[in-house]
Image (spheres, rainbow, N blue to C red):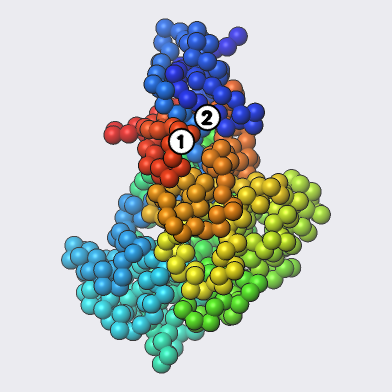
């Protein structure tokens, strides 16, 4: 006998995202789960005297968004604490913002912020600009992150706090960028950024309170954009403890799948590798799933640290790095890293930004498949550059294509890439339609806050469909790889749920699944695709409880 619903939703245009493509206009919820899906007449008959009835007025209702790749701590801190910098700001505007923030701070307080656009970052390795930043900060340490979250611009006070001088050797996997005369410029590539982050973290008086605010803010931002489930793509011990405490106190409004880091994280301090893997085993609950290990296999193309099969362009980009970048593991080391994670019962999320690193990752996964079969879950982020001969291997090896549609539309990051990556490589970027045709699970992730100040779901969906900037543009990025709207929506709902091992629980509106759903301001199937980014989320529900209401 079906339990009397706590909530029914009627008169809706329901996109169920189920494999059968079921159309519906109503559903019922009891004890946080969908208990019936069908017509308004059918579902209305299930209501009892205490059932709440939500009349959607014909609006589109869909499953909660599953974001397969985000960074909750960094995103929440960006909104709650950091100095906001627009990606299009040049050095003068950045320094003006720093000066304004400095005027409101104590003499020892750090100025932390972002994001610096990649095209601006390309030109900051200049001691003259470092002097301007020093004057703007009035002696306070400054740490500014770029839009990839892999690189930093710091001032002289921050370099002193880091213990870095002109004689300091570069850290392994990173660079203190110098000018032609060997002088520090304040620009930090890759693992050099970690030294700055550790110096800043040491200055925070109450890190637990800061983490709590950051994660609560991140959850609110996600809910506002319709996100109910995320994969936190680089999870530290502090995050595990904070999220657990929030859930225990009824304050976690997001389902989180974690990815503990295999090596020290450049963005946050803390234990990593086998030590963190062991510690993380004590965590886990209804809303917190300890599921993956994060492996960084290379850097990013903008600083020529992504491992590419073809050489980078000789001009218009930093001289940092080799001609085609390099992987941070050799094949045997990578196989060993994957074996450690899989033997502990974890999946693996591999950052592989170049086509050479993607190939190495696929080679390593093939070894693990021979040893362990199809059970282990593997994600490759960000599948921007995949050589055509490797596309079929995603389907053959059961590898999830962790795609970041927020990064590819014409804009600042693409402008920076065009100065580094050969045009013929860019022209075949983000081969999502081919990956789908090869049988791959294409799952969307915002990579927030890298590339975008908010995880704006609807921008990502639109870009998957149009391959243009939001609102449309003459310029497109590999338009032959456009997805249909249905394919894009499933890539934000059911596919990532399956990729996270939660396909039986979330990702579609089906009886028995968690009642995670959204009410939208417009029906995406009835508007021009170039207007999808204008969508607002009127309400977000997690397990049948409303966690966001527009205007509230």
Which numbered disc, 1 or 2, marks the residue that appears first in the sequence?
2
Q: Are marks 1 and 2 in contact (CB under 8 Å)?
A: yes
Image location of residue 188, percent across then percent down = 43, 75
509 sits left or right of 96 in the view: right
> Residue sitting at 55 percent across and 17 percent down?
38
Q: In this picture, is 61 found above or below 472?
A: above
Q: CA distance from mark 1 to mark 2?
A: 10 Å
> Residue sitting at 42 percent across and 55 percent down?
473
- Which quadrant of the rendered structure holds the N terminus? top right
Q: Quadrant of residue 357?
A: bottom right
> Residue sitting at 49 percent across and 31 percent down?
62
Q: Which residue is mark 2?
A: 15
Element marked by disc 2:
strand
Q: Which residue is mark 1?
A: 524
Residue at the far left in the pictured view = 103
How crowded pointer 1 is (Cα within 10 Å; few <14, some 14-19, many 20+) is rated as many
């Amino acid at each position: 006998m079906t339990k009397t619903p706590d909530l029914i939703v009627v008169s809706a245009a329901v996109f169920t995202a189920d494999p059968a493509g079921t159309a519906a206009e109503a559903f019922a919820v009891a004890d946080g789960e969908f208990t019936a899906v069908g017509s308004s007449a059918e579902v209305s008959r299930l209501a009892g005297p205490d059932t709440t009835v939500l009349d959607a007025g014909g609006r589109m209702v869909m499953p909660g968004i599953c974001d397969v790749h985000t960074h909750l701590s960094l995103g929440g801190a960006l909104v709650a604490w950091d100095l906001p910098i627009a990606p299009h700001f040049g050095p003068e505007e950045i320094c003006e913002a720093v000066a304004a923030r400095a005027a409101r701070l104590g003499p020892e307080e750090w100025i932390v912020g972002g994001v610096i656009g990649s095209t601006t970052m390309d030109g900051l390795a200049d001691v003259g600009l470092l002097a301007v930043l020093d004057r703007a900060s009035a002696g306070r340490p400054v740490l500014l992150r770029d839009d990839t979250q892999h690189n930093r611009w710091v001032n002289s006070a921050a370099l002193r706090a880091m213990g870095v001088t002109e004689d300091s050797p570069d850290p392994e996997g990173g660079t203190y960028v110098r000018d032609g005369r060997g002088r520090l410029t304040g620009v930090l590539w890759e693992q050099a950024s970690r030294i700055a982050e550790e110096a800043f973290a040491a200055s925070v008086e109450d890190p637990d309170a800061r983490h709590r605010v950051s994660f609560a803010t991140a959850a609110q931002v996600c809910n506002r954009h319709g996100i109910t489930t995320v994969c936190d793509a680089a999870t530290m011990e502090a995050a595990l403890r904070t999220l657990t405490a929030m859930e225990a106190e009824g304050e976690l409004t997001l389902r989180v799948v974690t990815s503990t880091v295999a090596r020290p994280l450049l963005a946050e301090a803390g234990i990593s590798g086998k030590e963190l893997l062991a510690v993380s085993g004590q965590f886990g609950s209804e809303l917190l799933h300890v599921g993956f290990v994060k492996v960084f296999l290379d850097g990013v193309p903008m600083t020529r640290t992504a491992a590419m099969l073809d050489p980078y362009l000789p001009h218009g980009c930093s001289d940092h790095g080799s001609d085609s970048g390099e992987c941070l593991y050799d094949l045997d080391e990578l196989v060993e890293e994957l074996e450690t994670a899989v033997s502990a019962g974890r999946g693996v999320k591999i950052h592989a930004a170049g086509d050479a690193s993607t190939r190495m990752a696929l080679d390593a996964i093939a070894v693990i498949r021979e040893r362990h079969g199809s059970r282990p879950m593997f994600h490759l982020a960000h599948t921007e550059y995949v050589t055509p001969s490797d596309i079929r291997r995603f389907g053959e090896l059961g590898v999830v294509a962790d795609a970041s549609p927020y990064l590819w539309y014409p804009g600042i990051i693409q402008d920076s890439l065009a100065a580094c990556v050969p045009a013929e490589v860019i022209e075949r970027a983000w081969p999502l339609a081919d990956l789908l045709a090869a049988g791959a699970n294409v799952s969307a992730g915002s990579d927030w806050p890298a590339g975008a100040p908010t995880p704006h779901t609807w921008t990502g969906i639109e870009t998957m469909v149009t391959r243009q900037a939001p609102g449309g543009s003459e310029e497109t990025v590999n338009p032959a790889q456009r997805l249909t709207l249905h394919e894009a929506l499933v890539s934000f709902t059911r596919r990532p749920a399956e990729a996270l091992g939660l396909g039986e629980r979330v990702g579609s509106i089906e009886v028995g699944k968690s009642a995670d759903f959204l009410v939208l301001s417009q029906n995406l199937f009835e508007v021009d695709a170039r207007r999808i980014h204008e969508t607002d989320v009127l309400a977000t529900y997690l397990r049948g409880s409303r966690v966001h209401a527009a205007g509230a």
